[in-house]
Amino acid sequence: MEVQIIDDARDLLAIEAAWWELLGRAVHAQPTMTPAWLSSWWRVFGDTGGRELRVVAIRAAGGELVALIPLLRRWVVRDRVFPVATLELLGSGEPVEDEICSELIGAVVAEGREKIAARAFAEALSGGDLGAWDELSLSAMNTADPVVPLLAEALSRRGAAVEVAETEVCPYIALPSSWDEYLAMLGREKRYFVRRTLRDLETWAGPGGMALRRAEDRRDLTRGFQILQGLHEERWGGPGAFRSERFRKFHDLVTHRLLHERRASLDLCWLEVRGEPVAVLYNVAHQGHVHFYQSGRRRDVPRGVRPGIGLHLMAIQRAITMGQRTYELLARADQYKHQISPGSERRLVTLSAVAPTMRARAVSGARRTARTLVNSAREVTRSCAALGGARGQ
């Protein structure tokens, strides 16, 4: 294996064609692993927080790209005290106010090359090819991805202290070949809920009163994005995620790129009732996986009418017609996600590793000690408060 560390955005751009091709040979390739998503993310966030590119490209003899691990390096102050040199996945680690919430990210590895790629990455990491580091944090990865346990094992063998922890649960729908099969996958109550949602929406709209629009060109995209921001704000009673300038800039870049990208696609659609937009949906698709990302809806609709859920169901119908494989509802415990899915779930994990160096271990130990002392102090405070309350009775 030949390992190349890409630390310049121009070099990352130069391998995009090979990156797209590699995605076609990977097992769990997702829209959030594509150059369209991650290169756009780097353009927006790469100049913040002292971030430095550290993308690991692994090639077989002859130059074929077999793995790409899109990382960055930066200094992070942990627990407000400890400066830590951290390696993170591109698409993660933004400030909360700008957070993109990329999910199902991780290493892109050709099927059958997972073990050798994990070993090559661990060797490069321990050999200092990525520079000095204290912690590795690979977040929002799919626990079913075969490369996750192999990376953990390879890093452990090199002396790193490794932990893999589940963080989020993401409902999803394994799409069948027809709408009737989808309904059959649901339990009786869910099936009734789906049918009634569509029926009530049609009744409210009236004959010919409902129209589904989709962004097909730049003009449509501008219109659709305005609707998305407006209905998202109405749904949540404020600007929500769109209050962040970097958040808006990222989605402006990625949606324009996906609009005409043949290897991934944007599905920004909205539902109009009597000429007025009442719900909007922002989905991204790649290699049979449709990711629901963002939505919005009007709130001033009759009780029992659910335009947002109805639009999701229309998007599921379209995905089935197009032969897509999954409809990913992603994290957040919204009730409707469980009402329209048969119960299938993906679990996100974070793989964390502490470098096998004196400094990294000392910092990790000091952080554990500090957290223990803080927790002990809180427990003493709670006990004293409880004792004081008991005496006052």
Image (cartoon, rainbow, N blue to C red):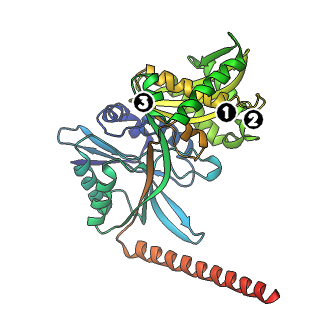
Which residue matches tag 1?
Answer: 296
Q: Is 11 on the left-hand or right-hand side of 205?
A: left
User: Which residue corresponds to the image point at 36% horizontal and 72% vertical from the top-left?
Assistant: 357
Where the C terminus falls, by quadrant?
bottom right
Q: Amino acid at mark 2?
A: Glu
Residue 140 visible here: no
Q: Residues within 10 Å of mark 3 (few under 14, many from 20)?
A: many
Residue type at numbered disc 1: Gly
Give the answer, above or below, for where 348 lies relative to 196: below
Q: Please tell me how crowded label 2 is: few (under 14), some (14-19), or many (20+) other residues with Cα within 10 Å.
A: some
Can residue 167 be seen here? The reply is: yes
For the view shown, which residue lies furthest in the right direction? 392
Residue 13 in picture, x, y percent from top left = 41, 35
Against 70, is 282 above or below? above
Per the image, the residue denoted by label 2 is 234
For the residue marked with disc 3, what is the amino acid? Leu
For marks 2 and 1 on the same chain, the one whose residue lies earlier in the sequence = 2
Q: Residue 116 vs residue 105: left or right?
A: left
Q: Work out whether residue 138 or residue 209 is closer to the camera in this orientation and state it.
A: 209
Query: What crowding class fits label 1: few (fewer than 14 Cα within 10 Å), some (14-19), or many (20 or more)?
Result: many
Nearer-N-terminus badge (2/3): 3
User: Which circle marks residue 237 in the picture?
Assistant: none
Taking the image as shown, residue 288 lies to the left or right of residue 217, namely left
The residue to which callout 3 is attached is: 175
Occupied quadrant, residue 225: top right
Judge by depth and name the residue closer to the eye, 178 or 121: 178
Q: Mark 2–mark 1 contact, CB under 8 Å?
A: yes
The extreme front residue here reads 188
